[in-house]
Every structure is written in C-alpha cells, then in structure tokens.
Image: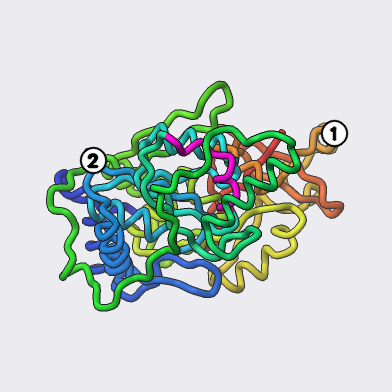
Amino acid sequence: MTIEALAPGERTLPAMLRRGAERHGDRALVGFGARSWSHRDLPRLAAARAATLRAAGVGRGDRVAVMLSNRIELIEVVVACGWIGAAAVPINTAAMGPQIGYVLGDCAARLLVIEGGFVERLATADLGDRALETTWVVGEATGIDTTTRAAIVGSRTRHEAIRGATPPGPPMPSRIACVPLPPLPDGIDDAAHAADPAIVPADTLAVLYTSGTTGPAKGVLCSHAQLHWWGVHSADVLGVGADDVLCTTLPLFHINALNTFAQASLAGCRVAYEPRFSLDSSVLQFHPTLDRTGPRLEIWNDFLPAAQHPDHDEDEQDRGDEAAADVDGRSGEQGGSECGHGSLLEVDRRGSIRRRQRSVLILRTGTLKIASATTKT
C-alpha cells in the first residue's frame, strides 16, 4: 500500500494529526493496555496538553524533557510539543541521576515530566545550574514522604547514610517547582486551540539521545519532516494499511517506537504499546497479548521452534545454542545501537534463544506487524 505524503509545506506533526482525524475519524490510533485513543482524539489530546504547557510558560523552541515508561502521557507530551513548536526530549528510563542531570543540562530543558517511580533518582542529579524551572510528576513519587520534594530530599539523605558521602551535585534548588502533572483541561479542542501556524517541517520536534557507548550521549535533532518521512517510507516498505495493527514492546524514548506511531497515524491503522519484552514473561504472554490487542495471526514462520523451521540446520543450532542471545527488555533501554536490528529470534521447546539474521526489522504476520525483540549478545 502506498502512503500518500503530505504537501511539502505541510509535513508537520499537527498536519499529520489533522489529516488522520479527517480521514480515519473514530478508528483507533494508539492503545496502552485496555485503553485506546482514536485518530480523531489525537489532535484534541495534543491541543489539551499543549494548553497546560503554554500555561507553564513553555513556548516555541523550548525543550521539554520526558522520562516516562510506555504510557499515554508520553505521547501526550510529544504531540503537545509538536503542537506549539517546542521539542520533546525523551530520556532513557534506565538513566540514573548523573545521566539525567547531563541530559537536562545539555538540552537546556525548562520542564521535566517524570514518572513517580523515577523521582528519587533526581537526588543524585546535578540540577544547580540547569535551565530547569518545573518538574511535573506522573503518578505518586516514591520516598519517605508523600510530597515530591520531600521524596527527593529524603532519598538524598538515605544516599548519604548508606554511602557515607554526599551525592554529587548540590541539592535540588528551591526555585525548581515540583508539582503533579496538571490534568487535561475540559472543553479544549484543536479548533479552539490551534497549533502554532508558524511551525514548518524543518522545525525540531524531538531531541533523541544516543546510547553514549563511546562517550557522552549526543542529542540528535529530529524534525517534523523527519517523523513524517519515517512514517511514509516505513509504512510503504512494510505494506502497512488501515486494517493492520502495529504492536511493539520497544520503549517510547527509542526511535523505532516513535516510528510506529508515525506509521499508524499516516496509514490510518492502530499501534498497541506494551510495557516491555522479557523472555520470562513475554513469550508466555504472546498469544494473550494478541487476543487483547486485536490482530489476526495467520503466519508465524520465522518464530517456529528451531527443529520445525524450514531453514533448520542441526550444526547451526548447536552453534546458536552455544551463543544463545540474552533477551531482556532492559537491553532496549540502552539506546538504539544495542537493539537487534535486522535480527529475528527463535525460541525452541526448551526456551533457548537463537538469533536468525534477516534483512528486515519487522515481520508481517497476517494483519500484525511485530517489531523484532531487542537483544544483548
């Protein structure tokens, strides 16, 4: 199926969302667990969250850091940033305090949206000379007190007691406000709160950081047009159509997970985001996940047990078993360079993992497109 590209001057996220709403209406676009949002919902969601960003002083050209697991609030922030000309900066959810402080300083984010379970890590982040003004917390922050700031200070105190030393960097400055994520305002829609008309395809939509394997992570500037063309070309090559379902366990701070959203938006189909992939749970939950997310499974060729695979070779299996890949969702949290691109995995009856080299990243199985699992070798 050929995906129709937007006109050159309209290759922006707001234009993508508006066209999706017009063409695909109430068809589901994105799902997390049992909840889903339609193509028509997304412009409204973008406008509503954008209203809260504007109220917080975020505007065109500003950076908004986001440290969330796979959940709708991350999509909210990304599309809202695109709506007002700001740039979203997803942070690796495996990052600890020093890495968080580095990213916040490097991108000069004014706002941080962080999951409650990650808040304690800010106790060891150097935030003293950062541009950060406000922290929005999604969910409850863990700690010795119920308030966010007390949780951060309490975590810092425990760090001192356990380590016998002061954590690096000064305490969280009092000028940085820590508040719960503002609720979406009622009565906000994309017509009343239009996207910034000055947004052009070359504007930065997101800053995605590399894994930092050989040095400090680098922020890659990703434009609106880049997201548009990701979606157009990937969906075209893979034959994604409006009746398909994309399903991925990759984290949304990763380039491929964001790409699935672009594909679904442009093709008129749906993407289902799962929390993570791990061998202990995901293999056993595969069919229940398909039942819940709704795709029709017709072909399962490249994931047959090794002995049943048409390309099966006993010697190759022996070599593969000796170098079995260690599959765990955490490997995907280390950045794009450590994900198993071009690799498919087989699970035999004993639960062993073999990696079979293929030239594609995503399998087509009936109406389901499955992103290959991330691997560590």
Q: Is residue 185 above or below residue 4?
A: below
Q: Is residue 108 visible?
A: yes
Pointer 2 residue: 203
What kind of residue is marked 2?
Asp
Q: Secondary structure at mark 2?
A: loop
CA gap, disc 1 and disc 2: 48 Å
CA neighbours of label 2 inside 10 A, class few (<14), some (14 to 19), many (20+): many
Residue 43 falls in which quadrant of the image? bottom left
**At 68% from the left edge and 43% from the top edge, which residue is drawn?**
159
Quick check: 206 left or right of 115? left
Numbered mark located on residue 322 in the image: 1
What kind of residue is marked 1?
Glu
Q: Which residues are magenta?
A: 118-128
Q: Is residue 7 above or below residue 334?
A: below
Mark whose residue sits in front, 1 or 2: 2
- Residue 320 magenta: no
Q: Is residue 311 above or below residue 66?
A: above
Residue 140 % position (x, y): 56, 65
Q: Nearer the viewer, residue 364 or 171?
A: 171
Numbered mark located on residue 283 in the image: none
Q: Is residue 336 visible?
A: no
